[in-house]
Structure formats: C-alpha cells, structure tokens
Image (tube, rainbow, N blue to C red):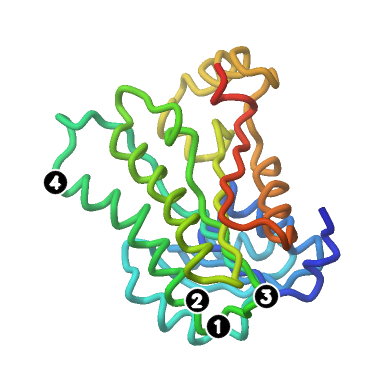
Amino acid sequence: MNDAMLKGRHVVVVGGTSGIGLAVARYVARAGAEVTIVGRDAERLRHAAEEIGGARQCVGDLHQSEAFGRLFGSLPEIDHVVVTAGTASLKTLRESTAEDLRAAVEERLVGPLSVVRAALDRLRPTGSIVLTSGLLAERPTHRGAILAGAVAAIEAIARSLALELAPIRVNAVSPGLVDTPLLDGFFGDAKHEALASAAASLPTGRIGRPDDIAQAVGLLLTGGFITGEVLHVDGGGRLV
C-alpha cells in the first residue's frame, strides 16, 4: 500500500463522524489527503473535524438522497468517495413493517447509489469509489434477512459499477464484527461479554477495530489495479 498516493487528493467520506467512517477520515488525513466528511448532525461533524485535525464538513443524510446533488455540486473536484454510513437493525421478516423494509432499501441501496450518481460530475477519471457491505452477506443470522439482502446487493452493485463507470474504480469493503458505537444498540449492557465471546470464536482471537477497516479502505483507494473487488476484513468470520 502506498499512502503517499493519497497526499493532496480530495477524499469524501460519507458517514465520517463516527466508527469506521471517522477512522477512514483520520487515516486519509494522516496520509496528507484533503478530507470532506458528510454526516447528519452538524455538531457531530464539528467534533469529528476537530478529531481529524481539520476537514470540510457537509450535512447529508442517506434517507434524503436527493440532497446529494446540491452537496457535491458545492465541492471541488474529488479523487475518492467512501460511503460508510448506515445503521443496522436486526428483525425477523414477521417483525418488520413495510416502513422497515423501505427504510433499509433507502439507506443501504438508494442512499449509496444516490451518493455515487451525485459525485460523478465531480469525480476525476483516475478516482475511485468504496462502498460498504458486511459479513451478513455471506453469514446471515436468523434475524438479519433484510440487512443481509441489502449488503449483498451492495457487493453486486460494486462489481457492476466497476464496468459501467470505468476507468473510475469501484470496490466494496466487507467488515466483520467491529467495535463501534453501532454495537451499543445491539448489545447494550451485555456488549463487553458478547464481544469477548465473539472474539474467542474468531481465528484472529479478537474482533475488529475501526482502524482495521480504515487500513483496508486505504488499500482500495491506492490500489490502482483493484476494481470490482469485495475486500473481506472480518478476522476470519466467514470461516467459522
């Protein structure tokens, strides 16, 4: 990986205020990139920009995808776009309402595709796009059919767009279990015990950290011969 290739490049991170997105923004900033972070909350954007050491801040929401055209129209030319935003709700199909289904599709499919479409006029031909899928695409749970379908679709979309948008490169990163604030809602007070149990089941002996995923994203951003790929960063979670 040649992080020097990020120096002076403009990287937009959608979902860059916490967890994996914030780690990606920090990573590319340390490599010398000009960073724009996009998130739903202006205050969280301000705090994230301070933590990164300076970043352009834009308010945007994957549930309001029509706004991304205006957002990207206000930015200078872009070298790379990384979409990490997305919540996660595990429900059985019987528990899910029609609104739950629409929200999952809006956030996990329509939102990222709207980001990509809006970015195209600003994205240099030498640039790239990194989308985010997830372990559920290959290792679904009994309560994760909706989310599994959505993240699996992102992988198919990345492969298809790698052909459609060439020479712009399009890839996806597929994180496994990563210790981010997103997991607080899953496990609550049982989070520590649940993560310890999960770590013991993995070949790596630990769960992921946001910086693990950021490093993988860095490879996809700088790997000029990588396109249409899904990079699994799951500690061997697909194997056990």
Who comes first in sequence, dot 2 or dot 4?
4
Comes first in the chain, label 4 or label 3:
4
Q: Amino acid at mark 1?
A: Arg
Look at mark 1 in the image and give the residue it sits on: 122
As shown in the figure, which amino acid type bears the numbered disc 3?
Answer: Thr
Of callouts 2 and 3, the N-terminal one: 2
Which quarter of the rendering shows the C terminus? top right
Residue type at numbered disc 4: Ala
Regarding residue 51, the answer to whether it shows in the image is no
SS at mark 1?
Answer: loop
Q: Which residue does the numbered mark 2 point to in the structure image?
A: 119
Count numbered badges in the picture. 4
Question: What crowding class fits label 2: few (fewer than 14 Cα within 10 Å), some (14-19), or many (20 or more)?
Answer: many
Compared with 193, 149 (above or below) is below
For the residues marked 3 and 1, what is the alpha-carbon distance in whole angstroms? Answer: 12 Å
Asked if the residue at tag 4 contacts the one at tag 1, i.e. Cβ–Cβ closer than 8 Å, the answer is no
* Distance in Å between CA atoms under marks 4 and 3: 40 Å
The residue that mark 3 highlights is: 126
Q: Are marks 1 and 2 in contact (CB under 8 Å)?
A: yes
Q: Residue at x 55, y 33 (%)?
A: 176
Q: Nearer the viewer, residue 152 or 190?
A: 152
